[in-house]
Amino acid sequence: MTALGALFYLLSAVLLIAAGLAATRRNPVHAVCCAVVAFIATAGVFVVLGAPLPGVLEVVVYAGAIMVLFLFIIMLLGLPVGVGAVPAARLVVPGVIAAATLVALFALIGVDPVGRGLLPAAMASPAAVGTVLFGTYWLAVEAVSIILFAALAAVLLLGRAERDAGQQGGSAA
Amino acid sequence: MNVPLSHVLAVASLLFAIGALCAVSRRSILMILVGVEFMLTAAGIAFVGASLAWGNLDGQAAVLIVMGLAAAEAGLGLALLVHGRRSGGTASIDDYNRLTGE
């Protein structure tokens, strides 16, 4: 096994263990911190698979921005804090369905002859990825920018509506 | 690099199952959003693995697009959570039934 292959399996183990811990912790701060570890391991997996630009953006966007936003929201709202893991009884029915789905997925992956060949060791340059992104997929990039703008407007509206209602109530009183 | 594509896809499907389990079994809106993020990340790992196996960069471009969509989704979901919590609700999904505008 080459060093890159060993690194892939190590990072995958860290990723899956951290994701499993994040999915079952009842304390939201612990869960989000485990999710940060999982996303950083995902960035490592991306780099090992020859995608440094998505790897760096995974750290910046997911672990650095989205998860910090989750932590801010937890601190802002004072969510109820539980201790330990989620009760196992609640996981039984979804767990059985997820296990059945996994068996079906593994069967599909197993019969695919393309999946047996070893992957080459390649590294895509960020410039090439950017050329493909803004060349072939410029319309999708523009659509994502419009969606981000719409989300920004919706977040501003949702964040402001309650304050306006409070001011109106205050002036009426 | 001694890793077959099937192992990459196996890791991606395991992560997707963990994310779906988190999204289905948790009651807190925050943890449902974390589960959805895991599912999107699993799709990203499958995209990157396939991009390496077939030797073109379309999969990596798709990952970047999915990342932008996930950022918009997380921001909007958390804003809904803050709004519901401020107007007297809880963070539990069972209490989120007032989007009908009554």
Image (spheres, helix red, strand yellow):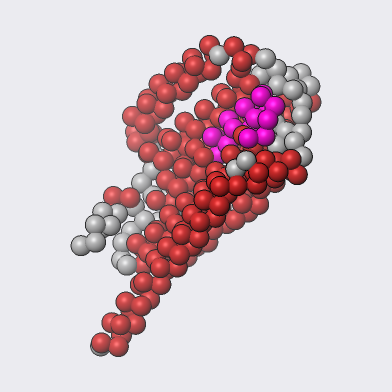
B56 up-or-down from A76: above or below: above
Residue A4 percent coordinates (x, y): 76, 27
**Of residues A17 and B51, which is closer to you in this image?**
B51
| Quadrant in the picture for the C terminus of chain B | bottom left
Q: Place residue B84 in its image quadrant.
A: bottom left
List x then y, in percent, for residue A94. Answer: 36, 31
Residue B16's spot in the image, x, y percent? Answer: 49, 33
Q: Is residue A172 left or right of residue A151?
A: left
Q: Nearer the viewer, residue A128 or A103?
A: A128
Q: Is B56 one of the magenta-colored residues?
A: yes
Q: Identify the residue at horizontal 42%, vertical 35% (top origin).
A: B21
- Dominant secondary-structure state across the stretch colored magenta: helix
Camera sees residue B55: yes
Identify the residue at horizontal 77%, vertical 26% (top origin).
A121
Indicate yes or no whether the magenta region holds residue B42: yes
Q: Magenta segment range?
A: B41-58
